[in-house]
Amino acid sequence: MSTQQPTNFTVPEARKLLGEYSCLQIKPVESEAEKERLRQALLLITDLSESENLGICADNAIQGFAALESYLKALGYEIPFNKNSIPSEENPCYIKFNTQRMSHFCESYTGDSRGVLVSCQSEDDAIAGTYGHLPLDLFE
């Protein structure tokens, strides 16, 4: 459902690249070119999925909701929350967003991970899967 057109990836190539960022150890993005390839791989897979769940681990709610907004826009979704209602607490948080219901919840988070998990829902096993932690600023 993205608004950007994916480039020359096949599904296996996109999954392979996304898989490099899907592990316990968070992999940093080394260059703008690598960031663009990662964006394109994610857009290809999400275009083919039926829906996505996003899990965002951030330093605070403002950072988390900014990441959520940028990912939703990149994936072609409307922003269903009011920016004025974002909690202003400075504590780490976890935001879970369901694109099928267009709903979310936000709770305290005590882990060290930071980034976005994208769980693609599909009956096609080549598409279904969870990818990340991807960079919070991947689509900024």
Image: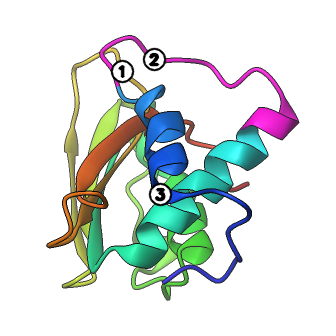
Side of 3 where 17 appears, left or right: left
Side of 34 where 129 appears, left or right: left
Please tell me which of labels 2 and 1 falls first in the chain: 2
Please name the predominant secondary structure of the magenta segment in the image.
Answer: loop
Label 3 sits on residue: 11
Nearer the viewer's eye, disc 3 or disc 2? 3
- In magenta segment, residue 26: yes
Label 1 sits on residue: 113
Nearer the viewer's eye, disc 3 or disc 1? 3
27 lies above or below 71: above
Q: Dot 3: what SS?
A: helix
Q: Dot 1: what SS?
A: loop
In the rendered structure, which amino acid carries the disc numbered 2? Answer: Ile
- In magenta segment, residue 128: no
Q: Please report the bounds of the magenta region as a residue range.
A: 23-34
Residue 44 rendering spot, x and y as whole percentages: 54, 66
Residue under the point 42% across and 47% down? 61
Q: Which mark is residue 26?
A: 2
Q: Dot 2: what SS?
A: loop
Residue under the point 40% across and 85% down? 80
Residue 108 rendering spot, x and y as whole percentages: 21, 36
